[in-house]
Amino acid sequence: MLHRTRADLEIVRPGDIEPEPWANGLGVTRVLAARPAWRISLAEIEGRMPFSPFLGSDRVLIPLSSEGVTLEIDGLQRRVLPRTGVAFRGEDHVSADTGGHRVTVVNLMSRRSSGLLRWEIRRGADQIEAGMDAVVVLGGEVRAAAERLPPGAVVLSAGTSRVSVGRDGIVALLWVEPRRGLTSRF
């Protein structure tokens, strides 16, 4: 269900994708974009719940909701504030605690065998350079060409150089540096 606004600009909005159950059945997610080496999804978390393992993957979690989330990663607690990220391995034992709130989070995942996951959160007025695999809108004013994008929207590689971030805009950039000759899939 990919929505194209222009022939050379691919944008996926959260409302374009139907929710589906987590692999462990305890939550729901929307897979916004998936390629052989990586995938981007929005998950909804409420209360305390364990994450599904994704062996051989590297993961980044970024809360969109204003409450943030507390993660327990292999027994260590870490508070993750809104629109900041934390990286962990798919093999790690991870559970989330939202303090009873319903929290939406961005999940970036890549197959370790396919390459090195690179990500960055960028804030404030800026034009996004070409070469990103994807740009995820985290908040504020972010536009692709003339269209203002909602939080959670993903702009795929063909359109990332057309993304502009306003003074209050926040985006996550994703790119995977591939390893030659490998084509792992999610």
Image: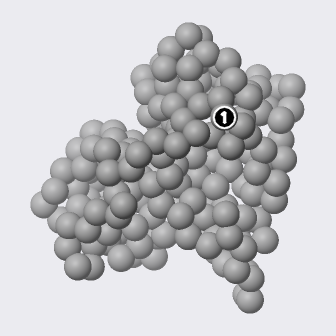
Q: Residue at x 13, y 60 (%)?
A: 146
Q: Residue at x 38, y 56 (%)?
A: 154
- On the question of residue 78 being in view, the answer is no
The amino acid sitting under disc 1 is Gly
Which residue sits furthest left?
A: 146
Question: Could you say where residue 5 lies in the image, as x and y percent from the top left?
Answer: 20, 67
Q: Residue furthest top?
A: 100
Looking at the image, is 122 positioned above or below residue 9? above
Measured as percent of width and height from the top left, residue 157 is found at 41, 73
Instruction: Give the residue drawn at x 48%, y 46%.
Output: 30
Decide which of 112, 84 is in the foreground and name it.
112
Nearer to us in this view, 115 or 5: 5
Residue 95 higher or lower than 184, as above or below? above
Q: Is residue 112 left or right of residue 154?
A: right
Question: Quarter of the image holding residue 35?
Answer: bottom right
Q: Position of residue 69 (x, y in %)?
A: 59, 24
Secondary structure, mark 1, is: loop
What color scheme is it? Answer: one colour
Q: Which quadrant would residue 143 be assigned to in this image?
A: bottom left
Q: How many marks?
A: 1
Q: Quadrant of residue 181?
A: bottom right
Can you give x and y, in whole percent of width and height, for residue 26 in the image?
A: 65, 29
Q: Which residue is mark 1?
A: 25
Q: Is residue 152 visible?
A: yes
Q: Is residue 141 left or right of residue 24?
A: left
Q: In the rendered image of this protein, does residue 117 appear above or below residue 17?
A: below
Quadrant location, the N terminus: bottom left
Q: For the residue carrying disc 1, how many other residues have a C-alpha within 10 Å: few (<14), some (14-19), or many (20+)?
A: few
The residue under the point 67% across, 63% down is 186
